[in-house]
Image: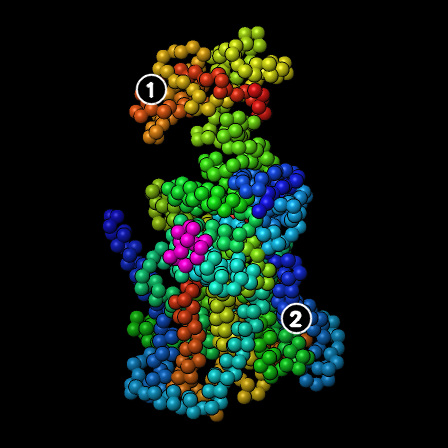
Amino acid sequence: MEQKPPILSWQSGALFLVPAFLFIAVFLLFPFVWIFYLSFTNQTLLGANAANPQFVGFENYARLFDFDSWLNRGQFGSALFITAQFVIGSALIGQVALGLALAIVFFRRKGILRELVYVLVIFAWIIPDVVVAFSWVAFLNRDEGTFNAILSRLGFGRPDWQLEHALLSVILFNTWRGTAFSMLLFSSALATIPPSYLETAEVAGASAFQKLRDILLPLLQGHILTDLILITLWTFNTFSIFLLTAGGPAYRTEVVSIYTYRIAFQFFDFGQGAAIAVVVMLINLALALIYLILLRRQSVYT
Amino acid sequence: MKRIKHLLGEAAYYIFILVVMAFFGLPLLWLVLTPFNARATLAVEIPQPFTLDNFQQVLNNTFAVRALVQNNMIIAVGAMLGVTLIATLSAYALSRARVPGSSQLTYILILFSSVVTGTAAMVPIFLIIFNLGLIDTYLGVIVVFIGGLLPAAIFIMRDFVEGIPRSYEESALVAGAAPSRVFLDVALPLIRPGMMVIAIWSFVQAWGSFLIPFILLRSPERMPASIAVYSFYTEAGTPNITLVAAYSLLYAIPVVILYLFVNWRYGFRFFGGIKR
Amino acid sequence: MSGIQLDRLSKHFGSVAAVDEVTLQIQDGEFFALLGPSGCGKTTTLRMIAGLEKATAGTIKIGDRDVTTLAPRERDIAMVFQDYALYPHMNLLDNIGYPLKVRGIPRAELQQRVTEAAQSLGIDHLLNRRPAQLSGGQQQRAAVARAIVHHAQVFLFDEPLSNLDAKLRVEARGFLKHLQRQVGVTTVYVTHDQAEAMALADHIAIMEQGKVVQMGPPLEVYHRPRTTFVASFLGSPPMNLLRGQLDLAARQVRVNNAAISLEQFRGWDRLVEHAQQNVNVVMGIRPEHLTIAQHEIPQSLTGEVYAIQPLGAESLVIVQIKGEPVSVRLFTDDTPQFSGRVWLAPDLQRVFFYHPDGELIA
């Protein structure tokens, strides 16, 4: 209700904001607008169309949505379908659920085990892309990899993960890679819940499950939604799994970010790449809007 | 009955921890052990025989070493300085000047930046950098990193600044300090922990990234470590496993050390908790 | 040194008037308290005097200077904040010396003046410490030291004692008043604690919803509250307020079926004037002005004993009269032994009558 008085005059404030505004305009707003234009041209990197791209109308889009081949491997529809499985598997079930589970399991627990788990989860998050890709190639290797060493010891045989379960592999990989963010977000959110809330429930005789369902989860709703938005968008756009599979074998892990890369930066067909980017961004925007509407609906608590 | 339930709960807790630790730890274990192994292996094995030879060979590869200590450093430090400076100024303005709806603004900014990102955004960004004549320059890579990391940095930083009571600056104003002094004497020292976290976060992001330098750089002598690591592949395209592992370990170590430093000094966590 | 004049000072947040045409004269060298519940506009008023909030309308004068539009640093003031605002990255010497530093005072003189200020507050042995290494009471003294170090014309205090525990708070009251008398600087002190305001101030102004409802010396305000709001805000427990009806013919007031004769009441004429429009009144009587008896006494109200609270030097008896609590203060060494039905007789020289909307009648 009460507005806080400014400590910084609006002139200084504006001055402080100029550099950020420039960067955001050049690398966020301008690309967003320009990409719409590019998607209607036949811009390429080299050749005649590089200097003088021609307006081609909806041709790029028509090629994307050519429904005869749309769901064939290596086509846009297939990439979208793979992305959907990838996002549901590694973002929703993987990172968000596992991050939440970890934060709750270690809620109000101290000690070496918690520290150890946190450090390992965070290392998986901060170590460079290429390094973790190599580690996972080794981890998933059919004959020597640690994963199969454990599975065969347990009597599950030695599947060739990279070949037979490629999509599952990258889902596991991306869950491993990104869970730290959700875990940290949820544990700092949990830390803000006053102990008396839970103590009141405990005194009233609530079980651990009831406390979780009736107190913790409702209080975390806003955080969960925010986390879901960000993780979904980030997973949709991540490129790290390229280093693990390069989209293969036979396009089976080619999510849209890798598909875009192939079209735009291997074939240098920028017009076509821009059309893909436009569709991807519109899907992202739609997802963000859905979450935002949900967030608004639950904001009565906060 | 209650006792059994409790014991079962404890058992489930430890099994869960064991599985999680295995899942997150085992893939990294290979990275720690293999560089010291004379034999190339993809398995997790105690180095047999133990050797430091791999590091010796890696350090003899001047191309890869330069990628790590020069190219990676220039790019990561450049991105770090730019992001920290610009995010601090703008987050401070968003919190302390009268900016209507600044909290919603930063939230929308971080969402929008998560939409315009990845390979989709690389198409126009590549053309922007191309037209600015910055393809195959450090500066081109650095400014793209700054543009990409800035929204999240501003978001985290604004949250941090909001957590600092205004009475610090107000008491300095009343004590007779001019606004510029208030910022330098009082506000900046108070924001410093937040700046440190942003600095290290942006350094880590730029240090480990693959896609942006991969697309924007051309000359081998400017390639960062994420691409130089492929110099440990043979002509036929098969990796020299022990060398790749040794180089990867060297490449990962600065990030791990920085994380441990931040965690020890400031506690690695989110400020405030990200909620609207 | 100089007094402060506020002339129809207002602050609007959107359509809400947080401070509504406040006019005050604060004399040179006096200790002035702004008292009221949270949200009454007292802190906003103080922050406007400091220059931390812009006034929407009205003027502020410090001495002869109109400071309404000046920046805080141009006003020559010192302020102590509720959270003290001691800079965590500076030791106490630099914290207290900061107002001198920004005025370009040489380091040697700064150190000497900081030491003097710290000595007068008994914290000169702590100058090398950081705020985090100090107790709450020490931090509070350091914040006061920072305020006195540069000899400002005006001291402003924003609830400076509210973060201290009860014992320290009473102690701090003592040194604050002593210090203010010593340096003789005009002081404006914001608090929601009526005991603090009464104990410290030469004059208090009580605010309600952005307006000053009464101003005067503390005892005058205490003994003659102009509205039921003031009556119920001052004193612990506050004045008892009971609804009643005037009976002009019988020259009585009826409160809960008991009738009390007003033959001797000093302000009967004004009550008559009021009763011509409205026979309803609110009768106000302080807890110490009621006599309690276990048996029926003349001119009394009757009710049931609800609770007895021995406080040491005094005791409180809470009596319920038709569901409404009425406090009685007794100065006895023993725990009062009342139970069941009791009778309460008001001292008619000390009774006030208010209009049902709160204004004092007589």
C-beta proximity under 8 Å, tags 1 and 2: no
The type of residue carrying mark 2 is Val
Q: Position of residue C79 (x, y in %)?
A: 53, 50
Quadrant where the image shows the C terminus of chain B: bottom right
Which SS class for mark 2? helix
Q: Main secondary structure of the magenta part?
A: helix
Residue C327 lies, with reference to residue C168, above or below; the image says above
Task: Return the residue found at the far top.
Answer: C249
Indicate the position of residue C261 as horizontal and vertical percent values: 50, 10
* In this rendering, position of residue C6 left or right of residue A226: right
Can residue C240 be seen? yes
Near-viewer residue (B109 or C301): C301
| Front position among marks 1 and 2 | 1
Chain bearing tag 2 is: A
Name the residue beneath numbered marker 1.
C338
Q: Residue at x 58, y 40 (%)?
A: C27
Whether residue A289 can be seen here: no
Q: Residue at x 29, y 87 (%)?
A: B49
Give residue A26's mark. Answer: 2
The kind of residue tagged 1 is Phe
Seen at 50% across and 26% down, the residue is C223
Q: Residues within 10 Å of mark 2 (few under 14, many from 20)?
A: some
Q: Quadrant of residue C9?
A: top right
Q: Which residues are magenta?
A: C115-127
**Callout 1: chain:** C
Is residue C121 highlighted in magenta?
yes
- Choose between B124 and B90: the one closer to the eye: B90
